[in-house]
Structures are given as C-alpha cells and as structure tokens.
Image (cartoon, rainbow, N blue to C red):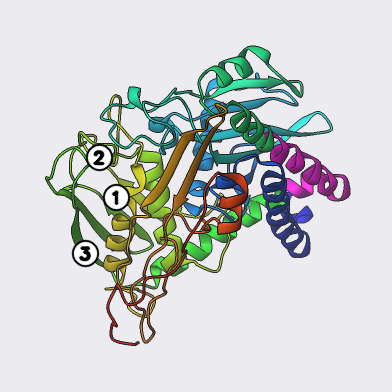
Amino acid sequence: MSQLKADPITTEVVRNFVISCAEDMNAALWRSAYSPVIYEGRDSAVAILDHEGEMLGQSTGVPLFVGAIDACVHLVLEKYGDDIGPGDIFLMNDSYLQGTHLMDFTAVGPLFHDGKLVGFGAARAHWSDVGAMDPGVPMGSSSIFQEGWRLGPTRVCKNYEELPDWIDLIQRNTRMKAAILGDFRAQISAIRTGERRLGQLLDRIGQDSYRASCLNIFEQARALDRAAIGALQDGTWSREGVIDNDGQSDDPVKVKLTLTIAGEDMIIDMEGSSPPVAGSINCGAVQTESLLRLAYKTMISPERAITGGSFSTMHVKIPDDCMFNAREPYACAWYFTGLGLLADLMITCLSEAMPERATAAHYGDSMVASFFEIDPKKRQWLTVEATAGGWGGTNGADGESALINLVNGGFRNMPAEVYETKFPVRIEEFSIRPDTGGPGRWR
C-alpha cells in the first residue's frame, strides 16, 4: 500500500510541508512569547513528529534541543499510552529525562485528524526562572534540588483547556509569574499551529498517503546515512580535553571520546570521561547524545533535515558513572559547559576520515551573562545573554568571528534597543573585541 500511494512527488511534498509546518510553529512561538530570551534570543526549538514520536520536521532555533525532542515524545507515549486525547498538552523539564537544565521546558501535544492520532507537536523553550536558589540559572548549585522544581511528563491541558491546579503550581514556583505563564501559552500556541497546518495537508492527500510518505522519508535518510558512513575509511580514533574546573573546585575535568568507523556504523564511546562532578556542569545522557547527533550532522549530513531515519548508523556508549550520564542528585544547571568541547573532540576524530570538512576547535562555552533586580516599585526583571566567540579555521579559510557556539546554533544576541526598552538598563558599549583568538593560518 505504501509504495503505491507514496509516489516520489507526494513524498517530496510531505517532506517540505512538514519543515514549513515546523517553521510556522516556530513563528507562532516567537510572536507570542513573553520573554526576550525566546523571541529575541531564540532559546527555543520546535518540531513536528509522527504518531510514534519519530522526527519529521524541525525549525531553526537551538539545534541542541531538536536532537532530544523525540525522546520527550517517547516519554509521553511510554507513560500515557492510549490515554492521550485531542487538546492534551504534556509538560516536562527533568534534567535526567530530557537532558538539559530545569529551565528548559518541553511542551508536547498530540495532533489528531478525523479522530485519529497522526503525530505530535513539541516546543521547547527556556523559562526565565523556575524557583532555584538564585534567580534564573544558579551559578553555585551542587545538587539538582537547588536548581528549581522538577517535572516528569505531566498532562497540564486536557480537551484544549488548561488544568487550573497545574497552572497554579507553575505560578507558585517562579519569581517571574507573568513571563512564565506567557511563555508556556506561547508553546501551546505553537503546537496548536502545528495541528492546524498538518490537518490542511491531510485533508488534501489523506492519512494513508501521508503515512506512506513518512516511511519513505525515514528509509531514504537511513540509506543516505549508511552510504555516507560506508564511504569513509574504517578506523578508531581517540581525543581528550579538559574543562578548567566544575565551578566548585579548581580541579580540571577530563572529557574523552573514542570514535570508531566500522563499515556502515559509527560507534562513539565516552569511556574515560570524568565521573559526575560536584559542580553543575553534569549533563543528562539524552542531551549528550543530542550533542553527538549535532556533531554527526555537521560532518556527515549538513545539507539534510533531521528525520526519524537519521542517525541509525550512530551508536553511543556512555558509562553509568560519567558526568555525561547524570543522575539524581547531580547538578545540571550549566550542562552545556562541556558539550562544546565534546563537539570539538568528535569533529577532530572525524578529521582523520574526512579532513576536508573538519574545523579547528572553537571557543566552546557560551559564557552566559545574567542580571536580576527588584526595582523600587517591587517589579522584578531578569536577563539572560549568551555571548558569542571565535571559531577555528577550516580547510583553506579563516574561522568565523563573534558567532555563537555549535551547541546553541541559532541563538542570537539581544539588541541594545531591546535591553533598554524592556529593562532599566543603559548600554554604553556593545562591540567585538578584535584579534582575541590570534590571526591563525588563513587570515
């Protein structure tokens, strides 16, 4: 049935439509979000997935998020099974389940058409404050219980209506009540947009043709990945580096990665990396694998959209006792600190097999600056700003300047005009420091 109904033209229509659908969802999120970190900084990502939680279309935004959104949908399916209905919204932020810090909330909603579950929409966004020991992202946390409230996959809307008890709980656990509620509803708006847009496509081509096209898209991605890895030389390469410290002591933190290419398979092993640390730079396994997916895509398939067939050739091994496989009670507020280094190590390993695509290491850590104040009228304000930096050179070209790191991708700096409009702040200078990384070979 699928081969008869999913002709190549229909498959391409579906492939491009779901990406367009995800971009429309993203536009809805950015237009309706309350916090500048979302609508200006773009600290968010949205995706549309099939009814089994396999990726179909993703938006621009923080690429590190998108590689783990499918895991969130799988968690919802695992917990709720058939107890999922039209208009439901599920919310989660657990660092050990979805991989990031507690400030990143993922909203997941089922997409129904003619009474049948045909997919899921998901929107992840950074919430400004979740009741941690410090406003925003705490610097000195040494336990997950100092970093805010933690939520596994939980139904917060039913039949297109918010559940009042959960809305009350959310607002009682944040310093930024209006902003958080506004951002949460913006995520819901993104999912509703996805349901409406996908329904328009299904009205035209039908559910069977749509499903068959999805399966074709997945298989094509698997075949292309197998061909790309199979074309590389077999071998095993190891690289390691260190993070200066974990924020609690001055001891360096070791990061090690071993990469093996064997036929059409790529095996990545984190054995030798530091065990969990006292500081808040630990990272959940889901987000670690998401970073490795990002580095894989950068080198293997930069021109192709991620789908449910992507990464089938990539196999990840993370030891249980590892900072990149964090478990309770280890702190994860600054989980991304080691991920930039991890990406550089993987790219350096792959440079042995594909030197024409490799880049030298980049600045890695996005170095977030944050300000919080309660003004004389008792109004609270909080800013989050991720700083850009220099990138290493490529084969025959100079590296990029003042570009956000690979981990954060589409994250943007906040314009001075927005700072001065939204917050009681005057920006005296906003500029690039020249030549901080040295001239390099190609400048």
Inter-mark Cα distance, 3 to 1:
20 Å
**Residue farthest along the top direction in this orientation:** 165
Q: Are marks 2 and 1 in contact (CB under 8 Å)?
A: yes
Magenta-drawn stretch contains 170: no
Task: Name the residue: 38% across, 62% down.
Answer: 264
Residue holding disc 2? 323
Task: Name the residue: 50% across, 57% down.
Answer: 427
Q: Which tag is nearer the camera, tag 2 or tag 3?
A: 2
Mark toward the start of the polypeptide (3 vs 1): 3
Residue holding disc 3? 237
Magenta-drawn segment: 188-211
Residue 269 position, x and y percent, is: 25, 50
Question: In what element is the residue under mark 1?
Answer: helix
Relative to residue 133, is residue 62 drawn left or right?
right
Q: Amino acid at mark 1?
A: Gly
- Location of residue 443 by image quarter: bottom left
Residue holding disc 1? 338
For disc 3, the neighbor class at 10 Å (few under 14, some 14 to 19, many from 20) is some
Is the magenta region chiefly helix, strand or loop?
helix
Q: Amino acid at mark 2?
A: Met
Relative to residue 228, is residue 244 drawn left or right?
left
Question: In what element is the residue under mark 3?
Answer: strand
Residue 345 position, x and y percent, is: 27, 61
